[in-house]
Image (cartoon, rainbow, N blue to C red):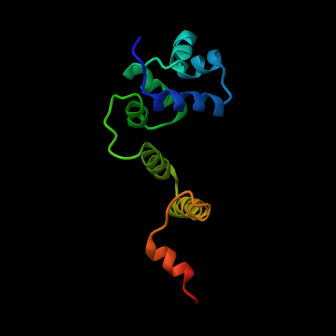
């Protein structure tokens, strides 16, 4: 058995957990056998066809799933690709602006918690008296 990249296996297991799907329910949703779902949970590398089925079943970009499985070169962070894909699905400019504002808010929260470093310019502007 060829092993899938760890990021695919972790993503797939989290996906099933997020959807609260057991092996048989996931197999029905993806339209693959339940032994295949179990194999994927245990780091088996999916075929390209299985990647396409997973993408369709869970409404993910096909290239995103293929890249996680090691079939495509990832030009950028897979999460950036996913965010871009999801933003393109939003129906209005206002919805897209709301999503962008949410991402900016999450970035500010992460910076405040020290999760991400800030640039010197940002740090200086925060410490200068108003």
Q: Is residue 68 left or right of residue 58?
A: left
User: Which residue sits at x=49%, y=20%?
Assistant: 43
Image coordinates of residue 82 in percent, x first then y, are: 46, 45
Image coordinates of residue 101 in percent, x first then y, are: 56, 64
Q: Is residue 50 left or right of residue 105?
A: left
In the picture, residue 47 is in which quadrant? top left
In the picture, residue 72 is in which quadrant? top left
Residue 83 position (above or below residue 30): below
Image coordinates of residue 46 in percent, x first then y, are: 43, 20
Quarter of the N terminus within the rendering:
top left
Residue 42 position (above or below residue 16): above
Q: Is residue 76 left or right of residue 56?
A: left
Q: Nearer the viewer, residue 2 or 102?
A: 2
User: Which residue sits at x=42%, y=33%?
Assistant: 68
Image coordinates of residue 58 in percent, x first then y, are: 54, 32
User: Which residue sits at x=39%, y=15%?
Assistant: 2
Total of numbered circles in the picture?
Answer: 0
Q: Residue furthest right?
A: 20
Q: Nearer the viewer, residue 42 or 69?
A: 42
Q: Nearer the viewer, residue 130 or 86?
A: 130
Quarter of the C terminus within the rendering:
bottom right
Residue 99 position (above or below residue 68): below
């Amino acid at each position: 058995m060829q092993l899938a990249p760890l990021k695919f296996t972790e993503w797939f297991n989290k996906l099933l957990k997020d959807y609260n799907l057991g092996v048989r329910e996931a197999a029905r949703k993806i339209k693959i056998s339940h032994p295949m779902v179990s194999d994927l949970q245990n780091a088996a590398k999916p075929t390209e066809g299985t990647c396409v089925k997973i993408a369709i079943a869970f409404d993910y970009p096909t290239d995103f799933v293929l890249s996680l499985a090691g079939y495509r070169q990832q030009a950028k962070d897979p999460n950036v690709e996913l965010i871009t894909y999801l933003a393109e699905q939003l129906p209005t400019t206002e919805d897209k602006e709301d999503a962008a504002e949410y991402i900016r808010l999450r970035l500010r929260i992460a910076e405040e918690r020290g999760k991400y470093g800030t640039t010197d310019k940002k740090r200086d502007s925060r410490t200068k008296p108003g």
